[in-house]
Image (cartoon, rainbow, N blue to C red):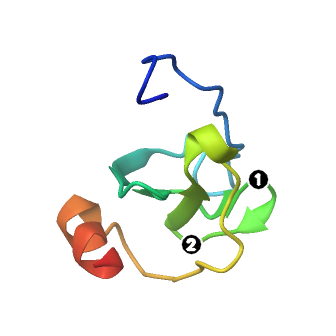
Amino acid sequence: MDATTGAVAPFAPAVPATLTQTDPWVYALLADGSKLYAEGTFNRVDGKSRQRLAAFDNVPTGGELDPAWRPSVNGNIGFWYLLQLIE
């Protein structure tokens, strides 16, 4: 979302179904100004391996998947853990 105009920027990362997860979910989103972090039941985002966690550049600057941020976890971690992870 553009902070000045309030316009919603286009943002549609590909989070495909898997053999065990036919309908991946995103459980938590956290924006810190420069990144948007997502946590959920996915294991791929935009064709790249991401185990339950992904980070994107701020949407007004492109919304691209961050290639450098690649933590991996087992199970759903939830919003509060995600918040601690990026601090």
Coordinates of residue 44 in the picture (x, y in percent):
69, 61
Specify the farthest residue to the right.
47
Q: Which of marks 1 and 2 is in front?
A: 1
Position of residue 53 measured from the top left corner of the image (x, y, whole percent): 49, 67
Describe residue 44's horizontal placement relative to residue 38 as left or right. Answer: right
At label 2, counting other C-alpha atoms closer than 10 Å, the crowd grade (few under 14, some 14-19, many 20 or more) is many
Q: Which of 78 and 56 is in front in this view?
A: 56
- Determine which of the numbered discs, if any, sits on residue 46 in the image: 1
The location of residue 86, given as percent across then percent down, is 35, 76
**Sooner in the amino-acid sequence: mark 1 or mark 2:** 1
Disc 1 from disc 2: Cα separation: 13 Å
Residue 30: image location, x then y, percent = 34, 53
Which of 63/28 is in front?
63
* Any part of residue 40 in sight: no
Up/down of 2 relative to 81, above or below: above
Which quadrant of the structure image shows residue 9?
A: top right
